[in-house]
Amino acid sequence: MKTMNHYLIIALILLYPLVNRAQNVEVDVNLNIKHSVGGISDFGRERHITMHSSLYENAWEGELDKAERLFEDLDVQLGRDNGVASFLHQFSPEDENNRQHHDPDSLSVLLDFWQGEYQQRITDRGLLKYKNEQSRGTIMGTNPHPTYPTLSYFENGLNGSTWGRENGFTWIPQDIETSAAWMVQYLEEFFVETASQEGVVMPEYWEVINEPDFPLNTGQFMMSSWEDIIEYHNLVAQGIKQKLGNRAPKIGGMTWGLHDLFRGDGISRFATANYVDGFYGNTAADEVAKAYARGQVDTPLFNHPRDTPWYQWDVIWKEFIDRAGDNMDFYSVHFYDWPQYQNQGGQRRSGGHVEATLEMLEWYDVFINGKNNRKPVIISEYGAVANSWDPMPHDTRFDWENLKPFSAMMMQFLERPDYIELSMPFHLLKAQFRDIDNNGDGIPEVVYHYKTLRDDDGDGVWEYSELVKWYELWDNVDGTRVDTKSSDPDIQVDSYIDGNEVYLILNNLQEQNTTINLNLFEDNDNNPTSVRIKHLYLEGVRNIVLDDTTTTNIPSSVTLRPEATMVLKYTLPNAVAINQTSVENKFYGEPVSNNQRVAINNGDNTFFVNNVTLPVDADKAEAMIKMTVTLFDAPQTENGFLSINKLTFNGVEVETPFDWRGETQNRSKWFGALEIPVPASLVQTNNTIVVDFQHVGEVNIVNLLTWDFSKKPGRSDQGNTDPDPIAVTGVNVSPNTIILNQGQTSTINATISPANATNKSVIWSTNNAAIATVDTNGTITANANGNAIITVTTVDGGFTSSTNVTVNNTPPTGDVIVIEAEDFVNTGGTFNDSFAGGPGLGVNKTPTNINYVNNGDWAEYTLNVTTPGTYDVEYLISTPSSGAQIQLFIDNTIASTTNVPNNGAWDNYTALTGGTINLTAGTHTIKIIASSVTTWQWNLDKITLTTGSTFSGKTIASTSQYLKLYPNPSSGKIYIQGLRTNSNTTIQVYDAKGTKYPDIKLNDDHSIDVESLSRGIYFLKVISKRNQTTLKIIKN
């Protein structure tokens, strides 16, 4: 496909771009190609053009005209509300027979009254006509005070009836069970099902608690723990779903305020649990209160070092997903830029940081729950904040600093329509409750900055703030998403079509003017007749401008101001025929480690993305590697700190950019996503990515995205034209010899020459199917003892290459018994850990392990043994505690005692040898006990019992500190460094599933040949008379 300048080719292929110019940033729009992700392709105004407000706010009093403009003219969707529940909790009467708890009967009366009161309020204000529309897709929840047991006896934590508050009868919830019980009754009784009923309509989303990370164990008086906050989510979700059934809203969390996953805590908290003493006096009652508060605070996660890197991921997000994820219907996230204007420091999260955070959250959720069970995300707040602004008079430049991420971040959210269900820019309607009036004269000395309506002159007349220009900019945008592409990742682009109207949105992440060439491709000579251009930008220091012009002179290029947004609305003579498709798919990479990060090595770093569905037609498709990394924050220049020296994709070197999405993040580390286009023709079912980075850092996630087109998209770089075919000149298969045991499988690889050959299709065949067969992917299955030849033949040219296969009889094997720690039948103990979020007495069961194991805790398992004999015991176990110990009993007789070493974490599971035991055939009771005096013991994943020659590939021991492999990865010879001279050593080979391969001969130079192994991860069990060690290798 060519541009409009090439009229002959246009006529031949009946496909042409409407406007084009040379160079600068190229933006391509294919009007006839629908772009869908997870089956979703609509803009979704009601999901994204939203406002952080509720129809029931007092701030709407006297503002019907503002409501009419926002709801009718600008089509804005409310909202979010955390105030109603917090307010009603604060006035809930105490139960006289159950102190420090609400009275259920009195709460019912209170809720019934306020149902009618809120209905009357919106009726009196003329807002009832909007109730049905503005009740859709709403988010509601609570603030930490007073609903959560913060133990605050300040005004914000007290609860009680009006009479009780006036007469000193107030109460505070003192445990999460009390708060959860109130929440369940509130949701069951307060909300109605439809807008036609009197009262507030049940929200679609319920956030359990808003931003608990900010007040937790700080001077804001919230004495609690991460464990309790997480368990509170479980209690609320379970209670609401059990009580309300199908009426229940979607329950979600953890609604953190800060998302810098690679950093330490980021918030200054008290260092020791004894800090609570400073909030109480010295009476006997105070001493009881102190002890209780310390018990609420002093938990394992409280004592986790807060300045360690990745604290926000390891301790906050990952713990939340692991402990509460099963009960959540969605995850809730807040994103904020910290601007540099009038602010010390400042950090940019728009761009790369947002991408990296979402990639990590999504990948881990899929890794734990599976792709089909991935939970959606709600962005219930985003924008910009700066604490240094708080005492300053309002400056319209503050509004601009918010308007920038409103568009920049939302365009990132729009890229994930099947994942991010709803997003909401943060600004409140009037927010007078956030103003500060120190002398009580009714004139606030400090006025809140983040408002939709402002009355800064105090005349009582509320005017629109500059933030409303965002809604004016995005007014009317709607329709079906179509294919777009930008040649610069800092120019965001998206496009939607509604009938004969085309909306093209451009956003500039760069801090300079950028000229953009507009290339519209359309199949049917349906040329625009006019275009309306809205351009939101900053002029000078604080002048926010929204230009709005309409012209019949269709521009071939536009200039986008620094960090500005432009919406172009083209009008065409006829409705656009959106009759082609682009289906975007994401494939999740293999784990880079057991904690979602791996240090970048000097030289090659190898990653895998497997089980990829190949595009239907690679000639039409596009593909991209998306690599989440933490690197040194520096300018994005060729050969700079953020650049890549070399990247190979399935053995073929691919050109890599050095300009990534977003500018510098103004911090020591750059946390972002490297988006690297790769030829779709190179995509395989199982893919290997090898990267040589310019500088040190960490890699977190490596994913692969593909776009499966029904037709070739128009591309200004001529990537859509049909290139001259490149002929195949040969094929080589590796390995060329392979030895298998009967019943084993192995995949061999065919390498086509040249690497950029057009047709890489091959045909696999065998000369003796009785001995070995081969499928279309080159996977060989060993059927019977003997020899066979597997041959690959290229479709283009008929070139061949063969592998000689030897199949041996299946060797005798032993037996492996895996006891999953969470599958216990009984548990008990002597230490009550419920104060720390544990189960009380005994161990705590999670979907994948057991935790909250204290001294004296035990768990029992029923074991059926079919093969009697001596079994090696291996625990997959983890602890940051010193002095931990585990004992194993067989039928109430102690069989082994093993000290558990401190490995620095609760979830860094490593294999630990637990001695040998004798088992007879039949049913046995296996019991494990945390047997030392250390209070907090260990977490356990599984116990593996191994006998005979079978080895469990699931519980490989850590790599020996004495033996090293090089080179690793390798495709041929590997040397084992550290072996004794003339040592009698056996090398056993297992794949990642625990399947044993034939032993490998150790050469005189202490090398081994792995050429016969298929590509993948293997474990070498190096066995000598003195000891045995397991080493991991990667076979290219």
Image (cartoon, grey):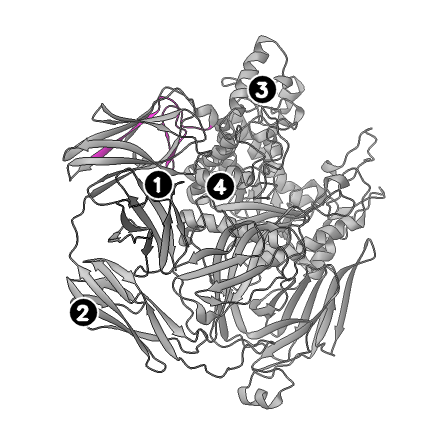
Q: How far, Cα to Cα, is label 1 from label 3?
A: 40 Å
Residue 916 appears in the rendering:
yes
Instruction: Characterize the local packing of mark 2: few (<14), some (14-19) or many (20 or more) Cα atoms within 10 angstroms.
Output: some
Amino acid type, callout 2: Ala
Position in image of residue 531 (x %, y %): 70, 74
Q: Which mark is in front, 1 or 3?
A: 1
Residue picked out by circle 4: 318
Q: How far, Cα to Cα, is label 2 from label 3?
A: 74 Å
Q: Which mark is in front, 2 or 1?
A: 1
Position in image of residue 248 (x %, y %): 47, 43
Which of pointers 2 and 3 lies earlier in the amino acid sequence? 3
Q: How far, Cα to Cα, is label 2 from label 4?
A: 49 Å
State the residue lying farthest toward the front: 981
Which of pointers 4 and 1 lies earlier in the amino acid sequence? 4
Which of pointers 2 and 1 lies earlier in the amino acid sequence? 2
Position of the N terminus, as image quadrant, is bottom right
Residue picked out by circle 3: 274
Instruction: Characterize the local packing of mark 1: few (<14), some (14-19) or many (20 or more) Cα atoms within 10 angstroms.
Output: many
Residue 857 part of the magenta segment: yes
Give left or right: position of 28 versus 376: right
Amino acid type, callout 4: Lys
Q: How far, Cα to Cα, is label 4 from label 1?
A: 24 Å
Q: How far, Cα to Cα, is label 3 from label 4?
A: 27 Å
